[in-house]
Amino acid sequence: PPPTAKGVVTIEQIVDTLPDRGRSCWHLGAVWALSQFQENELFLGMYPEEHFIEKPVKAAMARFRKNLEAIVSVIAERNKKKQLPYYYLSPDRIPNSVAI
């Protein structure tokens, strides 16, 4: 049950609200599995070439890839100065898919 008074909570009450070890392990495993990349993963800016053959489209794709490379470089440079680098939103680590 929730506390009946504000500011009066014991460590036992906090521990009682946490999931058991088995449930925690299951969730940890699920999160780990869903966060892994597949071997043949396509990342942002990577397209199967046979889908786009028109010159204007290829030129736009080249510009887009160049912009993505610049962003990757900026993120890599910023991460050099950080004690704990953050790569998760770097375009070379964003899958080109909504599937998990």
Image (tube, grey):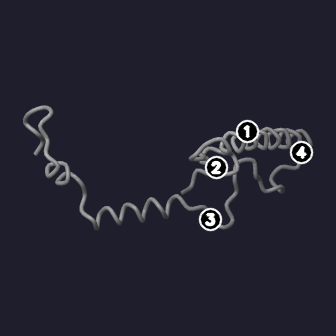
Query: Marks 3/4: CA distance?
Result: 29 Å
Q: Position of residue 43 (x, y in %)?
A: 69, 53
Most extreme residue toward the left, as rendered? 4
Query: Marks 4/2: CA distance?
Result: 26 Å
Pointer 2 and pointer 3: residues touching (CB < 8 Å)?
no
Sequence-earlier tag: 1 or 2 = 1
Q: Position of residue 32 (x, y in %)?
A: 48, 62
Q: For mark 4, does the 10 Å Cα neighbourhood hold few (<14), some (14 to 19), or many (20 or more) residues?
A: few
> Can you identify the residue that label 4 sits on?
54
Q: In which image quadrant can residue 81 be found?
A: top right
Sequence-earlier tag: 3 or 4 = 3
Q: Position of residue 8 (x, y in %)?
A: 11, 37
Q: Quadrant of the N terminus?
A: top left
> Can you identify the residue that label 2 sits on?
94
Left or right of 46? Residue 20 is: left
Left or right of 26? Residue 5 is: left
